[in-house]
């Protein structure tokens, strides 16, 4: 990794992109949020964030920037690391009670998923469950459209800022479900790498690994989608040049910027789908409320050993993008493990509180996850159980 340097001038210069939605990138661009709302005729947005972000400076700054442009706002922060259906209902009530006209979702993936999930039912009486990914999307009247949503990621990991999907945990089933509608794509994704400067090294590592895994799993999904595949390879290139620096030099704005863009591209890459890393991780997170990126990172080597032996061409292209010297399958997996070691990812799910006796239950639930369906290699229940058990006991 890191044989080639980043282009610092490019990364420090403001950029505006329009794929797959409007993207405003650049250090310090949070200051533009008031003007952006004025241009979008947003007068009273509900700010949706996670409970851990409420006292961080970017929330106060966001509200001040809005107020300076005569934009009212209110704050909803009852969102867990793995958003729950009851929290979404509470957010919808807050939206309606406050007569809000848009949502600004700011924070990590949970905040952005929470914001999108609230959007799904804030202006209608359709049950949230009707938006499940496997179902035909409900028809929403153009006379009563979804609220506009602006997404502002403060971590470089989830890639949720351009997506039309959101993950929600249903406590009764102890499962995560993917909800979506094609008309809930964010109006704007605002990527300001300055917002990630205060992120602790462990969260930088966990979210950074998550971004890398999105690109890897998205690229490995079968099917011809050169836009997603190109995004995946460029994501891996940027991450390979910036992940270590972002973790080890937390105030390095160039590394933070490259990770922010790499994360966004990873999110675009998995428009094709994901794989067993995410299928298993979703269900572990639903039961044990573990950090999603950290859970993914632990599981990654186990699933790669299962998926990659028959994918030599794709492995070579990923390996080249990440500037590894040996492009064999074994070397690629070994290099991924070295990355996980250096950024101090635990070697088993047991280390983060996941017990062995859940393995079969997690395996059965994982096979119902949307990401299981797009894994490049069809796995039996026995094989998924073996992967879950290996992840719990010793993933690498």
Image (tube, grey):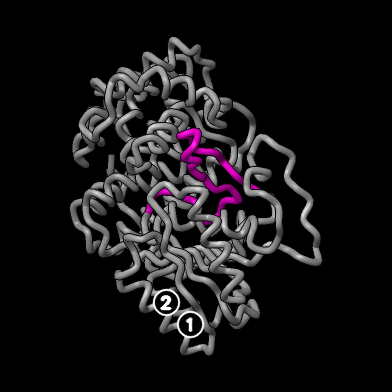
Q: Position of residue 82 (x, y in %)?
A: 42, 46
Distance, label 1 to label 2, CA atoms, is 6 Å
Residue 23 left/right relative to 127: left
- In this rendering, does residue 328 appear at all? no
Instruction: Please give the residue where the numbered disc 1 appears in the rendered image.
Output: 66
* 134 vs 91, nearest the viewer: 91
- The reply to whether the magenta stretch includes residue 161 is yes
Residue 137 left/right relative to 262: right
Q: Residue at x 31, y 32 (%)?
A: 324
Q: Secondary structure at mark 2?
A: helix
In the image, the segment drawn in magenta is 156-180
Instruction: Please give the residue where the numbered disc 2 appears in the rendered image.
Output: 62
* 253 vs 132, nearest the viewer: 132
The quadrant where residue 299 appears: top left
The quadrant where residue 285 appears: top left
The quadrant where residue 289 appears: top left
Q: Is residue 313 above or below residue 76?
A: above
Is the C terminus in the top left, top right, bottom left or bottom right quadrant? Answer: top left
Q: Secondary structure at mark 1?
A: helix
């Amino acid at each position: 990794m890191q044989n080639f340097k980043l282009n610092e001038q490019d990364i420090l210069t403001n950029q505006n992109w329009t794929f797959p939605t409007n993207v405003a990138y650049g250090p310090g661009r949070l200051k533009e949020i008031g003007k952006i709302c004025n241009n979008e005729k947003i007068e009273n947005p509900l700010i949706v964030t996670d409970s851990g972000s409420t006292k961080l400076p970017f929330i106060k700054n966001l509200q001040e920037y809005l107020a300076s442009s005569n934009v009212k706002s209110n704050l909803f922060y009852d969102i867990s690391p793995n958003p729950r259906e009851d929290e979404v209902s509470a957010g919808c009530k807050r939206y309606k009670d406050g007569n809000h006209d848009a949502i600004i979702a700011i924070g990590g993936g949970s905040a952005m998923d929470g914001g999108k999930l609230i959007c799904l039912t804030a202006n209608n009486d359709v049950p949230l469950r009707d938006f499940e990914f496997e179902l035909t999307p409900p028809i929403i009247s153009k006379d009563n459209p979804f609220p506009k949503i602006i997404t502002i990621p403060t971590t470089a990991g989830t890639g949720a800022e351009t997506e039309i999907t959101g993950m929600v945990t249903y406590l009764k089933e102890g499962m995560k479900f993917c909800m979506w509608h094609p008309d809930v794509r964010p109006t704007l994704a605002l990527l300001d790498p300055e917002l990630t400067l205060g992120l602790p090294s462990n969260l930088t590592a966990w979210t950074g690994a998550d971004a890398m895994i999105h690109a890897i799993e998205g690229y490995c999904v079968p099917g011809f989608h050169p836009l997603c595949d190109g995004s995946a390879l460029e994501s891996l290139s940027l991450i390979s040049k910036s992940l270590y620096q972002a973790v080890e030099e937390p105030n390095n704005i160039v590394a933070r910027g490259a990770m922010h863009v790499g994360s966004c591209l990873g999110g675009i890459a998995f428009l094709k789908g994901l794989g067993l890393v995410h299928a298993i991780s979703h269900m572990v997170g639903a039961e044990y409320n573990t950090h999603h990126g950290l859970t993914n990172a632990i599981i990654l080597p186990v699933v790669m050993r299962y998926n990659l032996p028959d994918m030599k061409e794709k492995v070579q292209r990923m390996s080249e993008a990440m500037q590894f010297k040996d492009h064999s399958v074994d070397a690629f997996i070994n290099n991924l493990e070295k990355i996980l070691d250096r950024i101090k990812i635990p070697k088993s799910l047991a280390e983060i509180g996941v017990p062995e006796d859940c393995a079969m239950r997690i395996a059965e639930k994982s096979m119902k996850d949307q990401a299981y369906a797009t894994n490049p290699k069809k796995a039996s229940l026995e094989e998924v159980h073996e992967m879950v058990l290996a992840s719990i006991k010793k993933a690498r």
